[in-house]
Image: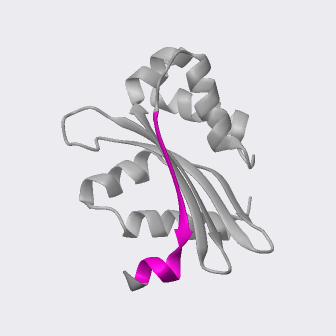
Amino acid sequence: MNEDLKIDLYKKLVSQADTNEKEAIKNTICILLVKECSNCIKKIYFYSYDLCNEGIDEFLLDYDIEYSNGEFKNGSCIIDTTEVMDAFGFESYDDLKKYFSQKYSDRDDAWKAIIEEMKEKGLNPSVDENEGDYDFMRRI
């Protein structure tokens, strides 16, 4: 994986986050894929964050594909971090992170494969995918 692209992704995520999310990203981020292709950049990463400030950490698994023509695809998966750790049999987030990193690092299909594995474990993550055109979105 290109370390410069990985650093750029990390900086972008941190710069767009509020103070609490920034700290969560710094402590829990795992970048599985940052890949520059001929017509796009693909990114797959996850982290754990108390999204609603209720003391419940959510496991956030995202992908972003930015095409050179201004189009994009992205997806998000959200589920309680504790549920994921319990389903996979891990007592710590770091163990879960290590497991996903070793199994899915540098795989183009990591996002879908992790969600599929969660479903096989009986979990029901909230999943959302979008696509569009950045230029069109800026004009709105």
Horizontally, residue 106 falls left or right of residue 63, namely: right
Q: Chief secondary structure of the magenta span?
A: strand
Looking at this rendering, what residue extends furthest in the right direction?
A: 38
Residue 92 image position (x, y, % from top left): 46, 24
Which residue is located at x 25 percent, y 59 percent? Answer: 19
Horizontally, residue 6 falls left or right of residue 138, namely: right
Residue 42 image position (x, y, % from top left): 67, 61
131 magenta-colored: yes
Magenta-highlighted residues: 126-138
Which residue is located at x 68 percent, y 79 percent? Answer: 68
Numbered circles on residues, count: 0
Q: Is residue 98 above or below residue 34?
A: above
Which residue is located at x 23 percent, y 42 percent? Answer: 52
Quarter of the figure that contains the C terminus? bottom left
Q: Is residue 84 above or below residue 71?
A: above
11 magenta-colored: no
**Residue 100 or 123: which is nearer the viewer?**
123
